[in-house]
Amino acid sequence: MHLLVTRHGETALNKQKKFYGSLDCPVDALGESQAAQLAEKLTNVPIDVTLRSDMLRTAQTAAPIIATHPTTEVRVDARLNEMGFGKWEGLNADEIQAAYPQDWQTWLDHPFEAFPTGAESYPVFKTRVLAALDDYQELINSDLTVLLVAHLGTLRTWHQHWFPDTTYWDLHFEAGCYSTYEVTATEATLTGLNL
């Protein structure tokens, strides 16, 4: 499988540095521009299948790409959604620290084990996201070009699954750019980052 991955365009909550994993917010004006820029970059790249989460921000980011690739098969999969942050959603780090100082410090110390009330734990999120990957074996075993439009946590989790020595927090997938992989049933190769 020839895999292209991209993060959704910017949202107002991105700009405000808020936690908003499961909030279904739209992209902002810059996000729309990033989606248009990405579509232009991909105009002459064949895309057989477009995968995206079922959130509005990925739908809006994918829309101009799909418009220029009318034969692409679109698959919407909620398992690709971002991790939810429970009672922290809609708050920035300073607001969380002020309202929930102990929970915040615990999460900073153990981000893959601790999680706020009402949130999805990282192990549950990881299992969900990788279960989706496991179900795309027919794509992985093909020569098709697949575009994934998703979220930072989702992209980081897929990447770290293939490259376990990678530090999760060091992975940056820029909005308006795409990264490329060659994926088989046994291995993945990163061939381009933030193009």
Image (spheres, helix red, strand yellow):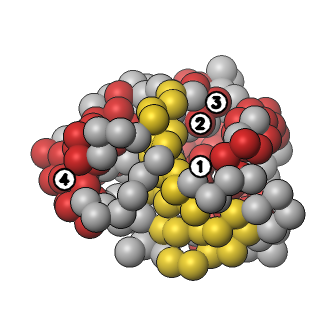
Q: Earlier in the sequence, mark 2 or mark 1?
A: 2
Q: Secondary structure at mark 3?
A: helix
Residue at 45%, 33% in the rendered image: 74
Three-letter amino acid code at the position of disc 3: Arg
Q: Which residue is mark 3?
A: 79
Q: Secondary structure at mark 4?
A: helix
Q: Which residue is mark 4?
A: 36
Three-letter amino acid code at the position of disc 2: Leu
Q: Which is more foreground, mark 3 or mark 1?
A: 3
Q: Position of residue 128 (x, y in %)?
A: 74, 33
Q: Which residue is mark 2?
A: 80
Q: Position of residue 47 (x, y in %)?
A: 42, 52
Badge 3 crowding class, 10 Å Cα cut-off, few under 14, some 14 to 19, many 20 or more, is many
Residue at 39%, 25% in the rendered image: 24
Q: Rounded to the nearest whole Å, what is the CA distance between mark 3 and mark 1?
A: 12 Å
Q: Quadrant of the N terminus?
A: bottom right
Question: Position of 31 compared to 135: left or right?
Answer: left
Question: Position of 189 compared to 92: left or right?
Answer: right
Q: Which residue is mark 1?
A: 153
Q: Secondary structure at mark 2?
A: helix
